[in-house]
Image (cartoon, helix red, strand yellow):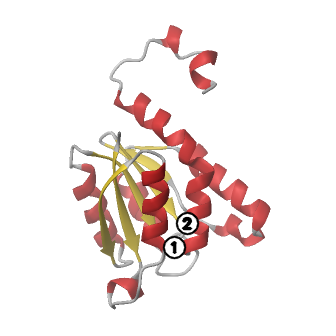
Amino acid sequence: MFGAHVVLVNDSSFNSDEKDMTGPKVIEILEKNGFNVIGKSKVSDERYKIEDELIRLAAEKEIKLIVTAGGTGCAIRDNTPEATLNVCERIVPGLSEEMRRCSALKVRNAILSRGVCGIRHGTLIINLPGNPDAAEENLEFIIDLLPYALEIMSEEKIDCSKTGTQRHRR
């Protein structure tokens, strides 16, 4: 069971007692799919605050997955993708591409999402939209891929003879 942490990125929820609708949906999906949700935090839309939170969480050994929700649109205060890219050593473009592709089939303007996915020190970071329904939908599109991604990320050396077609057809 992989440890996960959910980060809500939103000025309005950070600065008020506004009821969070997104976090519980994301946590429910993660737990339903076998993840151990270790915690949830809120951060404002300021890039350096998002970066600091991602760096802090990725340094915790038990956290292998960080899921952010919010700050992925085209508004001036939407800084989550840039903050994520600034702290990641590698990107995993296929996950964010799949979320956009599947979302755009339902809602055309979903293609404007700028969310990214990347890896920092063996921790996978995934950006979801802040809208509760969009966050739920996007996570559902890729949730089945995450255990395998985390499994291969944790292997120091992969035997290429075992990573062929059979392993990739899970």
> Mark 1 or mark 2, which has the lower sequence index?
1
Classify residue 8 as left or right of residue 52: right
Count residues near mark 2 (Cα–Cα under 10 Å), then give few for <14, some for 14-19, many for 20+. Answer: many
In the image, residue 99 lies at what x, y percent? 63, 55
Mark 2, secondary structure of its residue: helix
Count residues near mark 1 (Cα–Cα under 10 Å), then give few for <14, some for 14-19, many for 20+. Answer: many
Q: Can the viewer see residue 120 in this picture?
A: yes
Residue behind mark 1: 130
Alpha-carbon span between mark 1 and mark 2: 6 Å
What amino acid does circle 1 point to? Gly
In the rendered image of this protein, does residue 155 appear above or below residue 34? Answer: above
Residue behind mark 2: 135
**If the image is split into quadrants, where does the C terminus sit?**
top right
How many discs mark residues in the rendered view? 2
What amino acid does circle 2 point to? Ala
Of 137 and 129, which appears nearest the observer?
A: 137
Mark 1, secondary structure of its residue: loop
Outermost residue toward the top in this view: 161
